Image (spheres, rainbow, N blue to C red):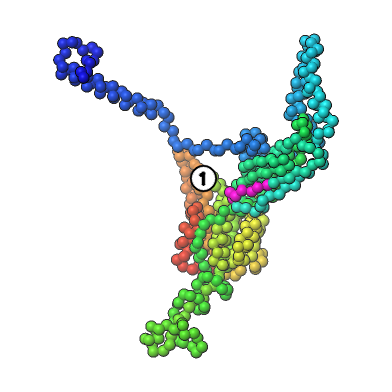
Amino acid sequence: MTASPPRGDSPETSPEERVRATVRAAARSSAQQAAKPQVRRAAQPTAGPQAPPQPQAPPEVRRALGGDGAPRPDAEAPAPRPDGWRPAERALRLATVAAVAVAAALLTGQPWLLALATGPACLLALAGSGRTRPADARATAEASTRRCFEGEPVTARITVAFDGVSGWIDPGVAPGPGTELRSVRVDGPLVTLGFTARRWGRWSLGIVDLDLYDAGGLARSTLRVDLGEVEVFPLPADGTFTPIPVRLPDRLGEHTARQSGEGIEVIGVRPHVWGERQRRIHWPSTTRRGSIQINQFAAERAADAVVLLDAFSDVADPATGRSSLDESLRVAAGLVRTYLRSHDRVGIVSVGGKLHWLQPGSGDAHFYRIVQTVLDVRRDLAFHTPDLNRLPPPALPHGALVYAVTPLADNRVMDVLGGLAERGNPVVVVEIPIGDPRVADGDAVEQLALRLWRLDREAVRFSLVEKGIPVVPWQGETLDLSLAPLLRTRLQGRIS
């Protein structure tokens, strides 16, 4: 096949020149075709990665919440609706149609327009008689659980009982500040609401206004139902390490003590005493010394730990927006769970506007008692420093290991830590990071203030270390990263 010469070439052009021109034209056209997608890609905006859109709530949830259906944790409960029966939306529409028909008949002088108002007027008269309305309405509410962890679902069921016939039930829900409405289902007189626990604390599950419509849907009456309170426990931080003090109480446990006893860890050998079991004979030492030698084991003891929760203030991290009080309670719950798994006794002392304490105990049920003790710390923020010297002896046993979980943002906690060190208890400070304050890049005064702020925090940590109180930072992932340096040696308090 002979390629046709490109346009503009003369007939006298040689075959070689025509071939070259054809090759150039083909290369030019292929280059243009390859450049078109590149131009199209370059025209698209080069924006950064966008966050995935939030899933929109179902229509029934948006209707129950009102507005756009977005959760409003700080919104107040709605005012109670008027008592008794009142016109519904359908009645208002029928009344509007009847009024327009009558007005049109009067303005135009056409009597036949009054026939358009006859049907709506009859329906309104039937609704006003009250024969199709339910009477003696009452409701009972129950929740699937009153205790849950953050992120767990909670189901509330409302059973409505009444005399007569009801058209339908339309619920309006005002969730509590720590919960979020996820689903709404109405099956006759049974209303099922699905919530999700968003934040730890002791919250009201919510308030529900049930609109009961008559058989024709022309009148409605509102019945308010309180769903009660729910206790949302924080998710404990993960951890496995359990540092122990030098002196352990004389109680059977899993930690190796320095005293000899009935354990499994060999700490030495000693001469045989008549009556001891032969299975404990250490044969290499017996062969070398020519007399029977017995393995000497270390005693296994349990530890007493007390978690001191700093509730003097709640500081938000400027970078992440995390609450220092939320992180403190998660760390405290993680410490409690870790030591309870080792069959130790753990107690809690919360210092803030109101002093909460629970004496050390053990067992799985004790974990929930400890968390319930400090669920109200959000409501107790006040300018009051408790006196730890007035604590009853069961709250802080002598020699118990004390973990102070604090952001070190309030100077009042320094007095509390100093008092604990003087009592002779070994103290460990778990510092909750609060982030550096935001400052302008070009402002020299703010940069200097930030430097002074950092130096002040370093001085606070240095003063604690000088008193013999180790300070470990909370890394935000697992407790083992923070507690690993404490495993180098046993914690020692003031000897008294």
Amino acid type, callout 1: Thr
Q: Is 130 left or right of 384, judged from the image as shown?
A: right
From the viewer's perspective, is residue 253 above or below residue 16?
Answer: below
User: Is 289 placed left or right of 63 in the picture?
Assistant: left
Q: Is residue 155 magenta?
A: yes
Q: Which residue appears farthest toward the front when viewing the image?
A: 1
Asked if residue 22 is positioned above or below residue 230 in the image, the reply reads above
Q: Nearer the viewer, residue 454 or 59?
A: 59
Would you say residue 440 is visible in this rendering?
A: yes
Please give the name of the residue rendered at 64% of the width and 48% of the height, measured from the top-left corner. Answer: 154
Residue at 48% over, 78% down: 297
Quadrant housing the C terminus: bottom right
Quarter of the figure with residue 87: top right
Residue 413 location, quadrant: bottom right
Q: Residues within 10 Å of mark 1 (few under 14, many from 20)?
A: few
Q: Name the residue: 44% across, 84% down.
A: 281
Query: Would you name the residue on which mark 1 appears?
Result: 320
Q: How many marks?
A: 1
Q: Which residues are magenta?
A: 150-156
